[in-house]
Image (cartoon, rainbow, N blue to C red):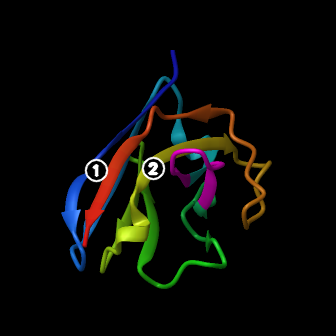
Amino acid sequence: QVLLVESGGGLKQTGDSLRLSCAASGLTLSNYAAGWFRQTPGKERDFVAGIDWSGGSTWKAGSLTGRFTISRDNAANTVSLQINNLKPEDTAVYFCAAAPRNSYYGGPFFTADYWGQGTQVTVSS
């Protein structure tokens, strides 16, 4: 059984930083590209950042600034998303996802085979 389990969310204040982690089991993460998405109530799930299977290339949504950094540790089978200088508009459920390594070539064009259950991030003003 493949599982992607996100952690690290919670209630934060404007200006805080946090690091979301996604732990994969039941698959070898180095065989997959990985991505982070976020969703607010009543809206579609939006691409946040993607990373190729090796970690050598990363992409972020065009609307986002340098506050977001995606990384991965294939030895640990984990993917992370660092968010600095949190803003209230970052409030969302954050999901990690995995796509076959040869199916993702960058940008928001990420077709996931697997999704995590999401972790809530709430930023108070």
Does dot 2 land on a helix, a strand or a loop?
strand
- Mark identifier at residue 45: none
- Specify whether residue 16 is in view: yes
Measuring 35% from the left and 70% from the top, which residue is drawn there? 88
Looking at marks 2 and 1 on the same chain, the residue that comes earlier in the sequence is marked by 1
56 or 10, which is in the foreground? 10
Q: Is 85 located above or below residue 78 in the figure?
A: below
What kind of residue is marked 1?
Gly
Q: Quadrant of residue 48?
A: bottom right
What kind of residue is marked 2?
Tyr
Residue placed under numbered mark 2 in the picture: 94
Residue placed under numbered mark 1 in the picture: 9
Measuring 42% from the left and 42% from the top, which residue is drawn there? 77
Q: Is residue 37 magenta?
A: yes
Do labels 2 and 1 touch, CB within 8 Å?
yes
Q: Quadrant of residue 106?
A: bottom right
Name of the residue lying farthest toward the top = 1
Residue 69 image offset from top left, x and y in percent: 44, 72
Q: Which residues are magenta?
A: 36-47
Q: Quadrant of residue 109?
A: bottom right
112 or 73, which is in the foreground? 112
- Specify whether residue 76 is in view: no
C-alpha gap between disc 2 and disc 1 = 8 Å
Residue 23 image offset from top left, x and y in percent: 38, 39
Measuring 47% from the left and 85% from the top, which residue is drawn there? 66
Q: Is residue 90 left or right of residue 104?
A: left
Name of the residue lying farthest toward the bottom = 66
Residue 18 image offset from top left, x and y in percent: 26, 64
Q: Is 79 located above or below residue 62 in the figure?
A: above
Crowd around label 1: few <14 · some 14–19 · many ≥20 (10 Å): some
Does dot 1 land on a helix, a strand or a loop?
loop
